[in-house]
Image (spheres, rainbow, N blue to C red):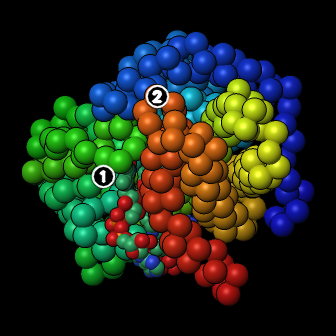
């Protein structure tokens, strides 16, 4: 398959993974989703169930004790978990986001130090790029790292870090040479027990309330010199290359949320009676369902194409990944909003899951780069 013609094929193994994850999601994750949201608590049941079944970090290569699952398989896991609980789907998604920089660029020793613990489910890992004043403009970060003998010493604050406090490991981007701007940023691995590291209070959010989002504080945080990922100055490129591989996973999360809302809406309109008949018998309702189905299916295919393109080494992977993330997340917002509409007043209450899905969908248009940034990346690629 060429760079522009690469498609994908779903194998029997992919379908088996979907069936297995759906079973776990429905039996062991869905029953807690409403409570996790209402109480803003971490979905520990999901972490345990996913870890027991080996679905918490399927992407880790076999050489480091992982399953070595391909990118589509990882998307399927995230999609099926997100179908019932978007917060819980950030367990496999962020384990991938935090570890891809290491898989792509770290020394063999550092890979051996970190990846087996994630593969075995003994540890999780987060990804620290953003800061309060450097979100979309990530290269404007201020967190500094300087070499001091055999150690790197980090100072600064990262913002909005998913699964903070839960994760043992943190991939952190920091400036090592301010003169060089983006090419003066390096990537490091920090452990939560490292001296000078602390996690801030949880943000109070609109959605994905089960996934803790916090600041990370570095006050002369001292880590061994060999915890740098790759050479000094390569950290920003590693961070952006990582997003080429992980924006499809956010697309998968969005597809899962949208599918969950569509499934709930279909069941509801069949059951709900008005004017002496089921509301699903009205063409005005049927056409909405048809549009929702078309969008979800199109988004799913684009997500799988983007996931496969990363592994095929397509030159256009940056553009296709950005397209998949933006398209799928816009679809998730539209479809969840329409699902609330199809539930009528009931959809606006916490008695049904669609209002949570609508709140959860919103974040997929914002994180891993806002959808304006995705459109900027797509357009830059077209005009280059
Ligand atoms: N892969 C490798 N290198 C890349 C790259 C890629 N995809 N894209 C750019 N680069 C290189 C460029 O070639 C350039 O290198 P040279 O100077 O050697 O040519 C360097 O990186 C800097 O690139 P740009 O000049 O394009 O950088 P920029 O400052 O204009 O910013 C940006 C680019 C696309 C706006 C980037 O800052 C960006 O993606 N911003 C959004 C931030 C983001 O996505 N954050 C996500 C945080 S994670 C998250 O939210 C968590 C979650 O989902 C749970
Ligand atoms: P800003 O950059 O301030 O953007 C404000 C608005 O301006 C947006 O609409 C934006 O699209 C628009 N805008 C900005 N620049 C442009 C432009 N050039 N052209 C057009 N429009 C533009 N980050 C991590 O590193 N790790 C994480 O684990 C993580 N998890 C997150 C979890 C949550 C719940 C949230 C809310 C955020 C998380 N983030 C994480 C941060 C996330 O990636 C940023 O919030 C996002 O990239 C946007 O940055 P910002 O919030 O500073 O918005």
- Residue pointed to by mark 1: 160
Q: CA distance from mark 1 to mark 2?
A: 29 Å
Residue 151 image offset from top left, x and y in percent? 19, 48
Q: Residue furthest bottom?
A: 383
> Relative to 15, is 111 above or below?
below
Image quarter (top left, top right, bottom left or bottom right) of the C terminus: bottom right
Secondary structure category for the residue under label 1: strand
For the point 77% across and 38% down, the residue is: 280
For the point 73% across and 38% down, the residue is: 275
> Relative to 326, is 261 above or below?
above
The answer to whether the beta carbon of the residue marked 1 is less than 8 Å from any atom of ligand 2 is: yes
Name which quarter of the figure residue 11 lies in: top right
For the point 27% across and 62% down, the residue is: 131
Numbered mark located on residue 279 in the image: none
Is label 1 or label 2 in front? Answer: 2
Q: Is residue 174 visible?
A: yes
Name which quarter of the figure residue 187 lies in: bottom left
Of 299 and 120, the residue lying toward us = 299
- Residue pointed to by mark 2: 351
Name which quarter of the figure residue 326 lies in: bottom right
> Relative to 131, is 376 above or below?
below
Report if the CB atoms under discs 1 and 2 are less than 8 Å apart.
no
Secondary structure category for the residue under label 2: loop
């Amino acid at each position: 398959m060429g760079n522009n013609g690469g498609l994908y094929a779903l194998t029997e193994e992919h379908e088996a993974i979907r069936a297995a994850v759906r079973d776990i999601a429905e039996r062991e994750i869905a029953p807690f989703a409403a409570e996790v949201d209402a109480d803003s608590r971490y979905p520990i049941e999901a972490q345990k169930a996913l870890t027991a079944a080996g679905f918490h970090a399927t992407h880790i290569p076999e050489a480091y004790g992982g399953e070595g699952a391909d990118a589509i398989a990882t998307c399927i896991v995230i999609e099926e978990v997100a179908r019932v609980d978007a917060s819980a789907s950030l367990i496999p998604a962020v384990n991938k986001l935090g570890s891809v920089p290491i898989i792509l660029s770290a020394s063999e020793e550092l890979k051996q130090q970190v990846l087996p613990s994630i593969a075995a489910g003994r540890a999780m890992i987060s990804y620290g790029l953003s800061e309060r004043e450097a979100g979309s403009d990530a290269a404007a970060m201020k967190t500094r790292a300087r070499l001091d003998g055999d150690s790197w010493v980090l100072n600064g604050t990262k913002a909005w870090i998913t699964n903070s406090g839960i994760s043992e490991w943190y991939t952190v981007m920091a400036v090592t040479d301010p003169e060089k701007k983006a090419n003066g940023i390096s990537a490091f691995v920090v452990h939560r027990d490292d001296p000078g590291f602390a996690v801030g209070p949880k943000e109070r959010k609109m959605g994905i309330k089960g996934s803790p989002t916090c600041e990370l504080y570095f006050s002369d945080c001292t880590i061994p010199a060999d915890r740098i990922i790759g050479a000094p100055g390569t950290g920003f490129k590693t961070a952006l290359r990582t997003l080429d591989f992980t924006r499809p996973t956010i697309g998968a999360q969005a597809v899962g949320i949208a599918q969950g809302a569509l499934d709930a809406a279909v069941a509801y309109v069949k059951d709900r009676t008005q004017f002496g008949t089921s509301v699903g018998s009205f063409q005005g309702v049927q056409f909405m369902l048809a549009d929702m189905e078309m969008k979800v299916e199109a988004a799913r295919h684009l997500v799988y194409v983007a996931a496969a393109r990363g592994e095929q080494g397509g030159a256009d992977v940056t553009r296709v990944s950005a397209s998949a993330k933006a398209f799928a997340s816009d679809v998730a917002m539209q479809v969840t909003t329409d699902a609330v509409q199809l539930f009528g007043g009931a959809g606006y209450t916490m008695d049904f899951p669609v209002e949570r899905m609508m709140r959860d969908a919103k974040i997929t248009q914002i994180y891993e780069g806002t959808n304006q940034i995705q459109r900027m990346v797509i357009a830059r690629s077209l005009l280059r």
